[in-house]
Image: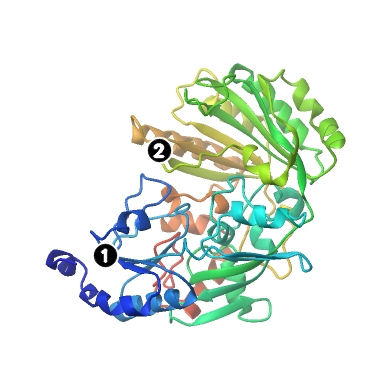
Amino acid sequence: MNTADARAAPGLHNAVDLRPRVRGSVLLPGDDGYAAGSSGHNTALVHRPAVVVTADGDDDVREAVRFAARHGLPIAVHATGHGQAVPTDGAVLVNTAQMNEVRVDPVSRTARIGAGARWEQVIDAAFGFGLAPPSGSAPRVGAVGYTLGGGLGPLGRSRGYAADNVRSFEVVTADGVARTASAEEHPDLFWALRGGKGNFGVVTSMVIGLFPVPRLYGGGLFFPGEKAADILHAYRRWTAALPEEMTSSVALTRFPPVPEVPGEVRGRFAVHLRVAYCGPEEQGRRLLEPMRLAGPPLLDTVQDMPFTDVGTINGDPTEPGPYYERSTVLDGLGPEVVDVLLDHAGPGTDSPLAVVELRHLGGALARPPEPGNAVGNRNRGFTVFTAGVPEPDARAVQRHQERLVAALAPWGSGGPFLCFQSADESTPDHVRAAYEPETFERLVRVKRDYDPRDVFRLTHRISARS
């Protein structure tokens, strides 16, 4: 560490004292591995932490938290780099990517998942026992971080949010103490961790329930963009009577002209219906028939598949890149909502958004778990998610997203959707709006108990002083 770095980060000349205490690595600006250890999935956010601790186990996490406390530094956590809300400048960044052990117990139908494990590891480990986790649509996302933010995936309507299925967490809180949070131990902390994101500590592992879902009837129907009105109205009618075994979404997508995109939709505007049905293929075909008839589709990839192929349903991007995201929650999907979506992102518009997606809620997502957790908006019907790349005009993307969210506000919460809350939704007002008022106030009380100095503030911040 050079003299300029030491002046820029007071107290970090003592980082050398941390190195013998940590089995992993302690990396300062300029060190090999520092850039890789601090970079996130969204490259529109640039991170300059004071020190990166690549943890090799729970003890390393405790040492990093205690070091931060001694020097009055905030703590940020990085596993796969997804979901980071704000730059981690000046922080002690705990990188948990190496803590990626996954152990499946087929008898209890649970998995113990390390802080850095990706859902794809859990999916593969569980599949050998005919089981599946409540994972997301993108299997390369970190399992723990996803779950702390609620977690809405292809099994959502039949199995609930990922956070609903957690049995326990191992967590290091702001005082450097390792705790077990469960229904029996620290139940208030357990409640808050399931939906309260990274505000309460560094989760080093979790135990989560698995389900006997070895296969799905899933995939996508791709329709011409000029048929968007017909498809969205058909989707509105179709979702009104679906069983909860069918989880679905529909997206207005402007596909880039790249080889990874199927030729039928490459470089064109299309409507992409995504479905995941937990049941027999024959029954799934019958349920999907009204949407197939709404077409005809340009491309139909829906088929019986092993759960290990679940990531092909949405085909979410796997490589880092710059993007802006916004979201909101709707009470339902009436004709007026469809009109708003078409006015802002339909055919013939100058929308700069790559994706505007509707996801169907309800079913098990509407039922609070026992014991309860901080995931709210369970009475809502749909969520809207938008994404765009900041090139060539970043501000045009943000303005368009702001106008769309504002136009949809009369039919929903007006606030962001917790599971998809982005870096552009990290202001105090956005964070508060992601929860019902009584839930937010309870989260503040738990924050005061476990992190009164707001050490864990480099996230969608819930302040102890709110």
Inspect the image, locate mark 1, and give the three-letter code of the amino acid beneath it: Leu
SS type, badge 1:
loop
- Determine the residue positioned at 70% across, 57% down: 126
94 lies above or below 68: above
In the depicted view, which residue is nearer to us: 446 or 113? 113
Q: Residue 28, which numbered label? A: 1
Compared to residue 411, the image places residue 104 above or below, namely below
The answer to which image quadrant residue 186 occupies is bottom right
Identify the element where label 2 is drawn: helix
288 sits left or right of 439 in the view: right
Label 2 vs 1, first from the N-terminus: 1
Report which residue position mark 2 lands on: 398
Relative image position of residue 251 (x, y in whole percent):
60, 32
Mark 1: few/some/many CA within 10 Å (<14, 14-19, 20+)? many
In this view of the protein, can residue 251 be seen by the observer?
yes
- Determine contact: label 2, label 1, CB under 8 Å: no
Q: Residue 262, how many percent across, how many down?
A: 58, 24
Determine crowd level at label 2: few under 14, some 14-19, many 20+ residues with C-alpha closer than 10 A: many
- In this view, the mark in front (2 or 1): 1
Q: Position of residue 312 (x, y in %)?
A: 63, 38
Residue 417 in view in this figure: no
